Image: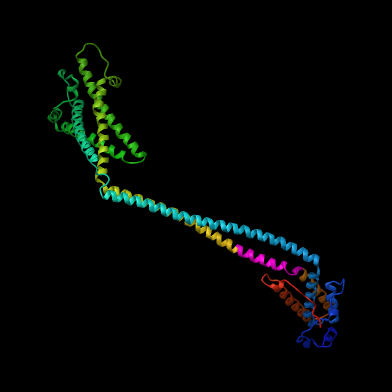
Amino acid sequence: MNFGLKTLFRKSDADNLNKNIVVDSEDVRMEGETYKTWGFRLAGKAGGNNSVLSSALNVVEQNNRKEQIENQQQQEKSKQEIEAKLDALILKKKKLEDQKNGLQNAIEDSLEKITSFKDAYTDKVTDYEKKKQEIKNGATGTNRTSKLTLIISCFLLLALAIYLFTFYSSAVYSAFFKEFKFDDMGFGSTILDSQALSKAWHQGSQSGLFCSLLPFVFVALGFVVSQFENQDGWKSVVKTIIMYAITFVFDAILAYEISKKIYDMEMLTQLGDFPPYSIRMAFENIGFWSIIFLGFIVYLIFGFVFGFAMKTYDDLTDRKGQLRMIDKDIQKEQEKLNRKIASENNKISKMKLQVNQLSNNLLVVEQNIAQQERLINGNLIDFNALLKALNEFFMGWMSYLTGASSGSEKKTLAQQIFNNKISEVNNSFHPQKKDAIIDQLTLKTE
């Protein structure tokens, strides 16, 4: 049995709320009729009975959907828009995949670098361990040539030390304590005095100690200079130059004092006025430079031989030192390896975060592509147009209620029914809802 609007008008509102009310096919929107006019007309036929509103809104929705589906021009236009959007999404997916593949390749490269770093470190450590074993077995640093070199160096050092002690003790005595006589005018007698120390001690303990101990200062300077030369850096170079300069200046003072005494004694044997002895005259005096050569040059040679002897001694005896140096080199290689690995791991961590973000973006894009493909294969419904139709229909309905001086309760109920319908439509158009695509819609008729 069919129930139309006229049948419903004879029932009470309480009865109608419990019925599944439908609209007759003759009550659909007429040609050229607006949705607002349609709503006003149906409300009038129903006498403003809100029990019909829910069923009427369903008919409005179905009617609008059917109109949109049958509008081939609009369907084609919408599908073209979706195709354009789908192409953009596919292009975006390709770009994201390329970026992800590039990052994954970069991660693989970093992992290969870490492996190569470890292999290189292992090779170096293996070489170091071989060197350590050779040192422990006595394969390095104990050959006869090195021993002979050390013996010769020690002999030369002893001879040079004796020479420096003899020369400087005599030169100091001659420069500061000796009183020259006319029979001491020879170069050898003025500088090299075999009894310099005994004469100095005979003059007093102060002069004796000075002449006895001062030569050791030069030997000590030679030792200090050799230590500075074994150090790295510009500071050691500066210190070495300062030590050499101090020694040269002191030698120059000794040479000047001795050559001045010789000059003064020679002037006493000659008649006439002679200028006082000056630095310029000392620089032009061969005796001045001879004293410097006999002292400072030999001192330099002593320093060089001493440094060479120390190096040879280290090569011969300091196996533990060599092993410690190798252990330090291994430690440096380990620290270098750790820094390289940490750097690559940091890069890998950052790239993995980017890969995860790209994977999430790809998932979203793929979901959008799947949604657009479903849309393009079905019938498209314009959500905004559907809402507009429902709103216009409801405005016509409410216009009738207002004109009929219906009470606020009736209007509130109508508004509630309309809001429920709008919520239903919103849910149906949720991105995850398949019923956003309508394959087939017909008016519900009985």
How many numbered badges does the structure rendering display?
0
Question: Per the image, is 377 magenta?
Answer: yes
Q: Is residue 93 left or right of residue 415?
A: left
> Magenta region, mostly helix, strand or loop?
helix
Residue 30 quadrant: bottom right
Residue 356 quadrant: bottom right
Residue 410 rendering spot, x and y as whole percentages? 78, 81
For residue 404, say whether it is visible. no
Q: Residue furthest top?
A: 271
For residue 300, say whether it is visible. yes
Residue 130 rendering spot, x and y as whole percentages? 32, 50
- The residue depicted at 64 percent of the width and 66 percent of the height is 367
Question: In which quadrant of the rendered image does the C terminus lie?
Answer: bottom right
| Nearer to us in this view, 128 or 284 | 128
Q: Is residue 50 left or right of residue 209?
A: right
197 versus 265 height, above or below: below
Question: In which quadrant of the rendered image does the N terminus lie?
Answer: bottom right
- The residue depicted at 55 percent of the width and 59 percent of the height is 354
Q: Is residue 165 left or right of residue 423?
A: left
Question: Per the image, is 263 magenta?
Answer: no
Which residues fall within the magenta stretch?
361-384
Residue 324 rendering spot, x and y as whole percentages? 30, 50
- The residue depicted at 58 percent of the width and 57 percent of the height is 99
| Nearer to us in this view, 6 or 244 | 6
| Nearer to us in this view, 446 or 112 | 112
Residue 249 rendering spot, x and y as whole percentages? 28, 29
